[in-house]
Image: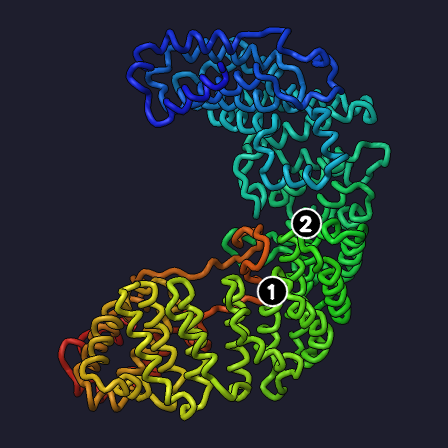
Amino acid sequence: NLYLLIEIYYDLNCQDIPEFFEEHMEQGFGIILKYLNYNNKLLEPVDDLDEDEDDSEITILIKCKCSIQELLYLYSSKYCDVFGPLIGKFVETTWELLSSMKPLSKNDLLVCNSMEFLSSVARINEFSPIFNNENGHLNLLLEKIILPNLMLHQSDIELFEDDPIEFVRRDLEGSDIDTRRRACTDFLKVLKRKNLVELTQISVSLITNFLNLYKQDPVHNWKYKDLAIYFYLAIAVEGQVISFGCVETNAYVDVLEFFKENIAIDLSEFDSKINPIILVDAIKYIYVFRNQVGKENIKTILPFLATFLTNDNYVVYTYSAVTLERILSMRESRTSNKFIFEKQDLVGAAEPLITNLFKLILKDSSKPEKLAENEFLMKSIYKICSIAQDSLNVFSNIVLKQLIEILTLIKSNPSNPRFTHYTFEAIGINIKNQLADKSNINKIIETIMPSILNFLADDITEFIPYSFQLLSFIVENTPDNVSLSVQIAQLSQPLLTPSVWELRGNIPATTRFLVSLLKKDPTIYSDIQPILGLFQKLINSKKLFYHGFEILEALLVKVNTDVMSPYLKSILGLILGRLQNKDMIFIKRFIVFIAQIVLYKSNDFNFVVQWFDSLQQDGVLKGVFNNIILANVDKLNNLFEKKIALSGLLTFVLKSNMLLEKHPDLVKNGLDTLLPCIAKQVHGTGSQTTSAPAIDLDTVEEISTFGSAYSKLITISKNPIDDPLPFVKLENNSTNNFGNFINTELLQPNSNLLKQLGSTFSNNELQYQINL
């Protein structure tokens, strides 16, 4: 009953303090304080004195105290102005509670909640002096509360031994949120912000003592070195991003010196008698401080990491794989595309590394779920292949065959979505590497197609979106003088089956595959009506219309005009119907689509005018062009899309004779709107966004879905909006930049027309050329 009352009291205070509670706060929290101090041996199991006993069951008294600490955190963080006079008593009681807590796993949540309350108090400037060292408080806090809870406990060791993959995930992915070590680390972060210098001095002294204890008896005192390294990480790390490692360190410690004195020896002279947890600590140190250790030191470490991939301990070889992958992912800066390690750094090393990783993955292939358990190993294979590129040569096809075999082994139960994703990423990068030489296309098809066809035939829903992405990439990279593979071509008709398009997760990949087939060989479909049915379904969808435009663009550009003509009027009617909804996202994509069509149909700049005229309705083109296209073109924020839109629309108004003859006012309106937009864009005053330059798998949307959910393969990704002007660069310092293209290809050749039209636009045009 007491536990429920505290929970209800917490709920009633979440939004605001009820007036009655505020008026009777001392009385209410007097009762709370009483039960925070309360102990009753009759409520404790008799085996509590033995740390080795099963102690996982949380008693009702512990539950009550956990709820009390949550309530204290709420009040200290949200209602400090009224709760302030009572904070001191609760800090003192919490301190005593933590000091007397036994190292039992059932107490973990209470320790975490208590630390969270102390952290919230330490953040308040008025109360942070409580944790200063004027009266030796900081020393006592570290020795009595922080360090005992940072020490590795029996439950941690059991997790390391009995469930090693969970141990790794907790440590690397932040799922250790309810552990003592995480709570202590978070508390130390707050303390560092308030008293960095003194805290660092005391901590370094304590760390030195622990390291000396370890050196006296490494076999039996290994826990002290584990504590020292973990404590040092908590003190030294100031800012950390998982993808990039530690980006900022405590100015009062020397991370590189600590590495040379205490870490390097464990990596280079590892003794089998030493506990493997110490080796994991050393590897983790490299993982965290890879930016500070530097490339030259890391190059000396890489051979040891490679050796650890042959270690029998699950956590040791997994940490080695993770650290290796993160090292190879290091970039020159957080916004750079350039990796620190390049393919020449892996010459002679990539093949044995990949071989060892495959051995670890296939170590236990008795069950699909066991084989696919450790996604970290597969991610490391992907990264090595990504950096090694074409230096793998013939070995790349061996890797490809092994990856396909792994997929075949797990297809009956693809239980780990991340493992599946990284396997397909690894396949993608190996195909990409081999296609550096286009003559490898048939060899690749022979290697993967039998298995891909089986996956599709067996309807392995987890594999289908990935399979279509691989097929699309192969078709897109088939040389013009090479015919479409018969094995791939046979999928063209099954692709149009409605069931293939029923699952939303399939649609981006199936769209890409369909478009790639149309662009490679538009005659592959003798009847385009089923494709138009797909277009109609997609264009009417609020979320999938993008893919409808992709299909329509391929049809209009690649399929013979005579084949398309009977359907153009109804197609335009569908689009105009959607435009009436005034969906800005749809409008922006429509603007880019029209520009694409103009640029791709360079042999018929009048196509758009004729298309709209086919409706036989006066004013449709005028209304769409003025009120939708010109009114919104400057709202395009993506620089890539804006380049296409402005180039295509200006081409349209300057080169369409039919537009000038029938709608001269649209030409004038177009120039009045487009030229200022172009000038603004060239001179860098327009709003613009581009894709993130540094793509990393850790920045991709979380891969955690079972079934047919779409996850883009980064290694073989493609912009869903094709670029009709790939030779026109977005950078102003490029020879073929956007501004030069507009000036030399469109404005100068049409200068007479510009002068004839006159009006306000000519000043804009003249000013634009002068500034350029």
Residue 75 at x, y percent in the picture? 40, 20
Along the viewing direction, whichever of 231 and 367 lies nearer the viewer:
367
Q: Is residue 467 visible?
A: yes
Residue 104 in the figure: left or right of residue 697:
right
Mark 2 surroundings within 10 Å by alpha-carbon count, few (fewer than 14), some (14 through 19), many (20 or more): many
Q: Residue at x 58, y 7 (%)?
A: 39
Identify the disc placed on residue 726. none
Q: What element carries label 2?
A: helix
Can you identify the residue that label 1 sits on?
466
Q: What element carries label 1?
A: helix
Query: Could you tell me the amino acid type at mark 2?
Result: Phe
- Residue 735 seen in this snapshot: no
Residue 734, quarter of the rendered image = bottom left
Residue sitting at the far bottom: 562
Against 10, is 417 above or below? below
Using the image, determine if residue 229 lies above or below residue 630: above
Relative to 561, is 514 on the left or the right?
right
- Image: 227 above or below 604: above
Which of pointers 1 and 2 indicates the residue nearer the eye? Answer: 1
Q: How many marks can you see?
A: 2
Residue count near mark 1 (Cα–Cα under 10 Å), binned few <14, some 14–19, many ≥20 = many
Q: Return the residue found at the far left.
A: 759
Q: In this view, does 273 lie to the left or right of 495?
A: right
Residue position for label 2: 376
Mark 1–mark 2 contact, CB under 8 Å?
A: no
Of the numbered discs 1 and 2, the one sitting upstream in the chain is: 2
Amino acid type at mark 1:
Tyr
| Image position of 507 (left or right of 290) | left
Residue drawn 54% across the image and 13% down it: 95
Q: Position of residue 98 (x, y in %)?
A: 58, 15
Q: Nearer the viewer, residue 29 or 292?
A: 29
What is the quadrant of residue 166 in the picture? top right
